[in-house]
Image (cartoon, helix red, strand yellow):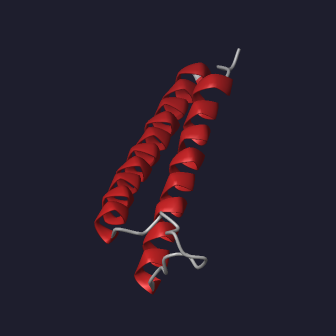
Amino acid sequence: MFYIEAMAGHDRELRDARTRYVAAARRLDESIRAFRSAAVPLNPGTEAEPIPWSRSHVQTTTALARALLDVLDKRKAWDQMRNEWQPPH
């Protein structure tokens, strides 16, 4: 009986981890779209000073970086749950 309960609990945790990963991936997609729309100048230009970034450029780029790190974190957690769990004996 304990084995079945443990499996059911693990299956639920796996579904939750997958859901968190999918949500993070969707947020990353939104961040990528916002970054593209913001037209953040990545080319430094030809002058000694770089092309300036606005406050919006910085915020959009920061949101993209955070979204990417969140996807990485959620994927690592999901992978760990899938690969390291051992059913009770």
- Compared to residue 73, the image places residue 82 above or below, namely above
* Residue at image location 38% in from the left, 51% down from the top: 23
Q: Is residue 58 above or below residue 18?
A: below
Tell me residue 63's x, y (percent): 47, 68
Residue at left offset 54%, top offset 62%: 66
Left or right placement of residue 17 versus residue 77 in this view: left
Front in this rendered view, residue 7 or 32: 32
x, y (%) of residue 60?
43, 71
Residue in the foreground of this view, choosing between 29 and 61: 61
Q: Is residue 6 left or right of residue 35?
A: right
3 in relation to 16, above or below: above
In this view, the residue farthest toward the right is 89
In front here: 56 or 44? 44
- Nearer to me, 52 or 46: 46
Q: Quadrant of the C terminus?
A: top right
Left/right of residue 36 with respect to residue 12 in the rendered view: left
Q: Is residue 50 left or right of residue 40?
A: right
Toward which corner of the image does residue 38 lie, by quadrant?
Answer: bottom left
Residue 63 visible in the displayed image: yes
Q: Residue at x 58, y 32 (%)?
A: 79
Q: Is residue 53 above or below residue 4?
A: below
Q: Can the viewer see residue 85? A: no
